[in-house]
Image: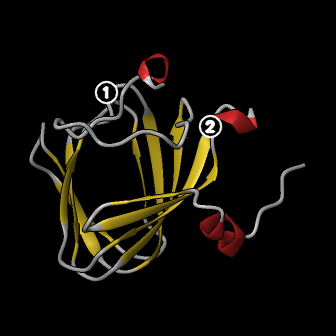
Amino acid sequence: MIVRDFDDVVKAGNSVSDADWTSVRMLLADDGMGFSFHITFLHEGSEHTFEYKNHFESVYCIQGKGSITDLATGETHQIKPGTMYALNEHDRHVLRAEEELVMACVFNPPVTGKEVHREDGSYAAPEEVS
């Protein structure tokens, strides 16, 4: 059984940030679960273009308000507490935070914790991460 406290994970340095978001990595590839689990904070007013070419992601909104736009279709969906979206086709998308968004995220395959977003908004495939 794996039991972790959010504050302890933060203190241990298992988070990744840039100017507009922070992702606390609660479970990673080394945990052997077959997925990773993160709590991600997107700063109010921020906009992000992502395309996880090598991963599937499912996201559940815990707090805040925003939107996600599928760049293939142009369709925009509102995000609020209780909204879930799954990027089941490696969907290129724009995520906008009208208020700070707090999101629970699951990645498959799991991330190692060393990934950074590449210029195209993706993470490297697991075998490419050193």
Q: Residue 106, position in %: x, y?
A: 54, 47
Q: Residue lying farthest left?
A: 74
Q: Nearer the viewer, residue 40 or 112?
A: 112
Secondary-structure class at tag 1: loop
Can the viewer see residue 33?
A: no
Measuring 47% from the left and 40% from the top, which residue is drawn there? 114
Q: Earlier in the sequence, mark 2 or mark 1?
A: 2
- Between residue 94 and residue 40, name the one nearer to us: 40
Q: Position of residue 76 (x, y in %)?
A: 17, 58
Q: Name the foreground residue: 89 vs 36.
A: 36
Image quadrant where residue 57 sits: top left
Q: Quadrant of residue 32?
A: top right
Q: Callout 1, which amino acid?
A: Lys
Q: Is 108 above or below relative to 42?
A: above
Q: Is residue 63 above or below residue 121?
A: below
Q: Is residue 42 above or below residue 3?
A: below
Label drawn at residue 53 = 1
Q: Tell me, yes or no, if residue 96 can be seen here.
A: yes
User: Up-down: is 75 above or below 123?
Assistant: below
Disc 2: which residue: 35
In the figure, is residue 61 to the left or right of 100? right
Identify the amino acid type marked 2.
Answer: Phe
Left or right of 74 in this view: 6: right
Q: Residue at x 17, y 35 (%)?
A: 120
Label 1 crowding class (10 Å Cα cut-off): few <14, some 14-19, many 20+? some
Q: Among all residues in the image, which is located at the extreme top?
A: 127
Tell me whether circle 2 and circle 1 mark residues in contact (CB < 8 Å): no
> How far across and down, in percent of the image, does residue 16 sit?
44, 56
Q: Residue at x 9, y 47 (%)?
A: 74
